[in-house]
Amino acid sequence: MTAYPADLVRTFERWWDEPPRMVRELFGVTPDPFQDEVLAAFPKQPRIAMLASKGPGKTCTESWCAWNFLLTRPYPNIAAVSITAENLADNLWKEMAKWQNRSDLLLSLFEWKKTRIERRGDAASTWWMSARSWPRSGSQEDQANTLAGLHNDYVMFILDESGGIPDSVMVSAEAALSSCIEGHILQGGNPTHRDGPLYKAHTERHRWFVVEINGDPDDPRRSPRVSTEWARDQIATYGADNPWVLVNVFGRFPPSSLNTLIGPEEVLAAMKRSYHPSDIERSPRVLGIDVALYGDDISVIFPRQGLVAFNPMRHRNINGITGAGLVSRKIEDWEVDACFLDNTGGFGTSWTDQLRLLGRAPIPVLFSEEPNDRRYYNKRAEIYFLGCQWIKDGGQLPPLNVPGMPELLAALTRTTYTFRGDRLLLEPKEMVKAKLGYSPDDADGLCLTFSHPVSPRHIEARRRIAMKAEYDPFSDFARAPQHRGMAGGFDPYGGV
C-alpha cells in the first residue's frame, strides 16, 4: 500500500482525535449540536447509542463516524446492519456513497460497492466496511452470527435503526470488543421496542454513552432538522401521549413496544397459495370497498370468499354514481352475501346512497367505531388483526404481480401496533400513509371484508357455478377494454 504524504499523515492524526474537525474540513459542512456531541465522543467512547425521534440525521452521523474510522485507522474492519437489508441499502449505505462523492480524497482511496466499501489497492481484503443482514426467522445463534468474523485490531459495528433489532445480533459485536486495540459499537434508532440493543443502552447508561435527540417543538435542544410545524401538528392531531407521537416527535419509548402486524414472509406465502373451488364453495362472498376522495388515493373493491381473496378492482377519480354502478353489478353477477364500505370521514356516503337507490344494502363501516371484540381499541384495529390472522391461518392472496399487491404487502408489513391500556391500537392511518408514500387503500379494502361475521345465502347457485368453473369474480371486467389492466385478468384457479 502506498504511504501517505507527511502532511496528509498529520491531517489524519488530527482527524483521528477530532472527528468534528474532519467533517468540517473534509465535507465542508457544520454538524448539528447533537452530531457534534456524537462525533466528539467517538474516539473516546466504545459504545455510543443515539436515541432519536424521526428524521434528525442520525444515519448521517453514523456515516461520518464510519468514514472517520475507515480513513484514520490502519486496516480497520467495519460491519453494518439495519432492521432489514433493504433499509440498510436505502439509508446508511446510500449515506456512505453520498459523502464519499463529496470528497476527492475518499473517491481516490476507497471503492464503493453494493455491499462492501474497500481500500483501493492491495489492502482491499483487509481494510473494509461490510453490509450485513440478520435472519428474521433464524435462531438466536443464526442472528448472533450476523456480526461474526471481525477479529481485528481496529473494529467497528454500526447498528442502524437498532430499535427493532434483537439482542442476539449484538452478541458477536460485544465479544469482538474484548480482543482488539480499539473497538466501537455505534447504534441509532427510534425507541419503538422496549427490548433489544437500543432499549438496553437506554437502561444501562453506565456502559453506554447515550445521546437523546428529539423534535419537541418546545425543547430548545431539539433537532433543527425536525419541522416544528410538523411536530406541533402531530401533537395536536393525536395527543402528546400517543405512542407514535412519543416515538416520532419526542424520541421517547412508548408504554409498550411498537410491533409490526405481520411479517413479509407470511404475506408472500399467502400470495403463492392455491385452493380448489370446492374448498370455498360453501363460504360467504364478501366485498370490501375502500373509497378514495380524490388525488393519488385509489378506490378499491376487494372480493373475498372464505380462504380466497380475488383480484381487487382499483380505480382513481371515480364518483359515487360510477362506483355504485360497478359494485351493484358485481353484487348481482357474483351473488354477494355482504358488502362492507368504508365511510370514515363521510367519503363513502355518495356510494352508499347510490347503492341503496339501486336496491342494494351496503353496510357502512367507520374505522373509529366500536369493535365487535373489546380486545381492540376500534374497528380499524379489529379488522386489520382479523385480516392478518386470516393470512396466517392459510388465506390465499392474489400473486405479487397483480396490481395493488406490492402496495398491500408493504402496508400490512409496515403498519405497527401497540396497546392503549389493555386494548390493541393500530398506528394512525395518516402516519402509515406518510411512511409508505401512499394511502394503504388495498390493505383497507381487504381488511374491510372482515368487518362483521357473514353467512352464505346462495349455496345451491354457487354449486352450479362451481360445476362451470366460473370462479373469477372480475373476469368480465378484465375482458372489457375500459377496465383492462385494472383487474389484471387473473383467475386464481387458472393462471394469468
Image: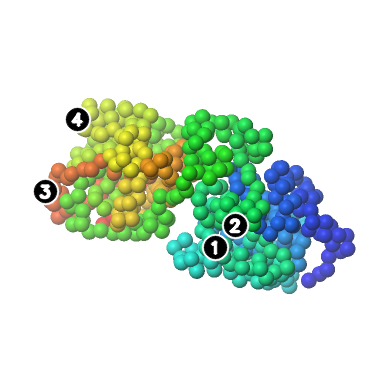
Rendered location of residue 29, percent (x, y)? 75, 45
Q: Residues within 10 Å of mark 3 (few under 14, many from 20)?
A: few
Identified at 79% across, 53% down, the residue is 18
Q: Residue 169's mark?
A: 1
Q: Residue 460's mark?
A: 3
Mark 2 lies on residue: 159
Residue 336 shows in this picture: no
Q: Residues within 10 Å of mark 1 (few under 14, many from 20)?
A: many
Quarter that holds the N terminus: bottom right
Identified at 18% across, 57% down, the residue is 278
Q: Of callouts 1 and 2, which one flags the residue occurring earlier in the amino acid sequence?
A: 2
Q: Of callouts 4 and 2, which one flags the residue occurring earlier in the amino acid sequence?
A: 2
Q: Which label lies toward us, 1 or 3?
A: 1
Identified at 59% across, 51% down, the residue is 202
Q: Residue 359's mark?
A: 4
Q: Which image quadrant for residue 373?
A: top left
Tag 3: amino acid: Glu
Identified at 75% across, 44% down, the residue is 30
> Considering the numbered disc 1 on the image, is that residue within a helix, a strand or a loop?
helix
CB within 8 Å, label 1 to label 3: no
Q: Is residue 73 left or right of residue 191?
A: right
- Determine the CA span between mark 2 and mark 3: 59 Å
Along the line of sight, the residue nearer the viewer: 306 or 218: 218
> Considering the numbered disc 2 on the image, is that residue within a helix, a strand or a loop?
strand
Tag 2: amino acid: Leu
Residue extending farthest to the left is 460
Rendered location of residue 10, percent (x, y)? 86, 60
Q: Residues within 10 Å of mark 2 (few under 14, many from 20)?
A: many
